Amino acid sequence: MATLKEILTRRPIAATIRLTVMAAEARPAKPVGPALGQYRLNLMTFCKDFNARTQKYKADTPMSVTITAFTDNTFEFTVKSPSVTWYLKKAAGVAKGSSRPGHVEDASVTLKHIYEIAKVKQSDPFCQYMSLESICKSVIGTAKSMGIKVVKDLE
């Protein structure tokens, strides 16, 4: 529960902006510039901070970022790791999932891949309190919905 001081010092929120930006490649051009510019946020500050936070990822990694813009032209942002579907496609080596999931399985991943993806997703703000087992089950469900078979070992 919030204290009285926290309630009195809260800044009014102007907008919540959700973007997908490639890791360490934020520039004041599209999609960042138009999205932040309409709320008069400092583009260069965002780009420098975002690039610093995401430099440990490969350059072609799509990162989901949620920016909270306040009415005093300041902002805060959180960066989530790439989506489970992106990790599964990379692990399976396919460009997209099956056109008929449940009927046609185009690729397969091992339980080790599932475990590694779950370990990465556990660091996300929304998954940090979930058990590793439940995250693994969620990743397996996503793989099945994409038509990717989960096997114990690759033959």
Image (cartoon, rainbow, N blue to C red):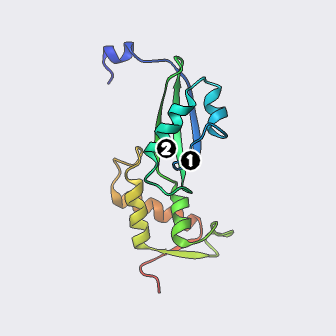
What's the residue at 57%, 64% (across, down)? Answer: 145
N-term mark: 1 or 2: 1
The label shown at residue 51 is: 2
Mark 2 burial class by Cα count in 10 Å: few <14, some 14-19, many 20+? some
Q: Amino acid at mark 1?
A: Glu
Image coords of residue 7 (percent x, y) = 38, 16
- Judged from the image, the secondary structure of the residue bearing numbered disc 2 is helix
Give the vertical position of 78 relative to 131 (above or below). Answer: above
The answer to whether marks 1 and 2 mark residues whose Cβ atoms lie closer than 8 Å is yes
Q: Amino acid at mark 2?
A: Asn
Give the vertical position of 9 relative to 116 (above or below). Answer: above
Viewer-proximal residue, 43 or 108?
A: 43
Task: Please tell me in which quadrant of the rendered image residue 4 appears.
Answer: top left
Mark 1 burial class by Cα count in 10 Å: few <14, some 14-19, many 20+? some
Indicate the quadrant containing the N terminus: top left, top right, bottom left or bottom right.
Answer: top left
Q: Is residue 125 left or right of residue 144?
A: left
Task: From the image, tell me which residue sits under label 1.
Answer: 25
What's the residue at 49%, 38% (across, down)? Answer: 48
